[in-house]
């Protein structure tokens, strides 16, 4: 049974198939309006979310399915100390597919290994957010017509911005894609991402902007800062204004996963290159396509997801990893292409 923890769990071909299915769903909605009539989606959100949760719910309703939602985790059994493994087993008894968001990195991975139904990661801490990337990929595909050879500027909080991590994973598999990472030095991409992908780094949006085909703005992730003063100092690092955008190519598209705080001035919304509200609509259709695909795959394969890993005394010391709060979880790792041992849950280097 397939679960989706990150975009790397999908092949390039599968992402393109999902784009095609989503486009067909846009064109012929009636054809798909009853394909999940007897299915239930459970949304399990341990972190605040409006748009992503509603997007999943809207997607399931459009497919004719039903939705069970846990919106206030303060009233759930997790607040009594229930483990992620138990929560996901229990939810599997009530639903056919689970979409979950959690503040700890790797939480969705733990759920996927324990659930009896497919799990979709709707964001695990600052780690991954694959369905936002699917929305982003469909937007790029519809606006630019291709992925190969694009120069993509990623601007803002690249350390904690999970949407950026999943987008790099998806786009890096295309020929000639170049990433220009624009961030304050404190909020650069995590080191495991820098080693794995060919990225250029700068602190200047003004200098990078004329080179870009896609400008992907992100918010500074206030909730992930341990030190409030650091957030206050960095929060207004980048603000895209019509003046700055006037230096960009005439066909450069501007994207943002939303919610925006101040990083794109409202005056930019009128510019035909602004695509962030289109991303919202594309997100619903890509989630419809993904739910449909995973439910269809699950009908053929009932086996539970287990990913190979080693557990030999090495430790993950990332305080944001799920192992930091669920003490009984074994510390496990896999080796990356350079032979570095990386935590199976959060990808950080083991010690
Ligand atoms: C993003 C997220 O949750 O990571 N938002 C979203 O999915 N709509 C981006 C963000 O919160 O900044």
Image: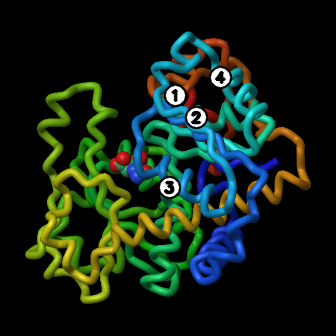
Disc 4 target residue: 331
Mark yes or no: residue 112 visible.
yes
First reached walking from the N terminus: tag 2 or tag 1: 2
173 above or below 185? below
Does 216 sit left or right of 250 as displayed? Answer: right
Q: Residues within 10 Å of mark 3 (few under 14, many from 20)?
A: many
Which of discs 4 and 2 lies nearer the camera? The answer is 2
Q: Which mark is residue 321?
A: 1
| Residue 124 drawn at (x, y percent) | 51, 39
| Residue 178 drawn at (x, y percent) | 42, 72
Q: Quadrant of the C terminus?
A: top right
Does 244 sit left or right of 196 as displayed? Answer: left
Q: Which mark is residue 144?
A: none
277 above or below 351? below
* Label 3–label 2 contact, CB within 8 A: no
First reached walking from the N terminus: tag 1 or tag 3: 3
First reached walking from the N terminus: tag 4 or tag 3: 3
Q: Quadrant of residue 117?
A: top right
Q: Who is closer to the viewer here, 22 or 206? A: 22
Q: CA distance from mark 3 to mark 2?
A: 22 Å
- Secondary structure at numbered mark 3: helix
- Secondary structure at numbered mark 1: loop
Q: Residues within 10 Å of mark 2 (few under 14, many from 20)?
A: many
Which of discs 3 and 2 lies nearer the camera? The answer is 3
Disc 2 target residue: 106
């Amino acid at each position: 049974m397939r679960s989706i923890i990150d975009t790397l769990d999908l092949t390039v071909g599968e992402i393109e198939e999902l784009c095609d299915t989503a486009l067909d769903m846009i064109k012929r909605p009636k054809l798909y309006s009853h394909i999940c009539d007897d299915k239930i989606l459970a949304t399990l959100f341990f972190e605040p979310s409006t748009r992503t949760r509603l997007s999943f719910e809207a997607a399931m309703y459009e497919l004719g399915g039903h939705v069970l939602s846990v919106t206030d985790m303060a009233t759930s059994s997790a607040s009594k100390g229930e483990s992620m493994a138990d929560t996901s087993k229990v939810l599997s008894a009530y639903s056919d597919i689970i979409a979950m968001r959690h503040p700890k990195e790797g939480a969705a991975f733990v759920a996927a290994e324990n659930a009896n139904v497919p799990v979709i990661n709707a964001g695990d801490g600052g780690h991954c957010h694959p369905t936002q990337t699917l929305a982003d990929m469909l937007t790029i595909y519809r606006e630019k017509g291709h992925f190969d050879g694009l120069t993509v500027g990623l601007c803002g909080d690249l350390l904690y911005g999970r949407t950026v991590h999943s987008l790099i994973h998806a786009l890096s598999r295309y020929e000639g894609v170049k990433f220009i990472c624009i961030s304050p030095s404190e909020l650069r991409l995590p080191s495991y991402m820098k080693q794995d992908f060919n990225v250029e780094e700068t602190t200047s949006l003004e200098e990078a902007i004329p080179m870009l085909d896609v400008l992907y703005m992100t918010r500074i992730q206030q909730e992930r800062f341990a030190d409030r003063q650091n957030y206050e100092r960095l929060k207004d690092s980048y603000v895209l204004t019509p003046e700055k955008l006037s230096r960009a190519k005439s066909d450069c598209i501007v994207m943002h996963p939303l919610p925006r705080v101040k990083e794109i001035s409202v005056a930019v919304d009128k510019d035909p290159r602004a695509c962030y509200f289109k991303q919202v609509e594309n997100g619903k259709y890509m989630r419809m396509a993904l739910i449909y695909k995973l439910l269809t795959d699950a009908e053929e394969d009932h086996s539970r997801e287990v990913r190979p890993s080693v557990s030999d005394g090495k430790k993950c010391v990332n305080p944001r990893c799920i192992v930091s709060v669920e003490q009984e979880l074994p510390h496990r790792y896999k080796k990356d292409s350079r032979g570095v041992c990386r935590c199976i849950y959060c990808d950080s280097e083991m010690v």
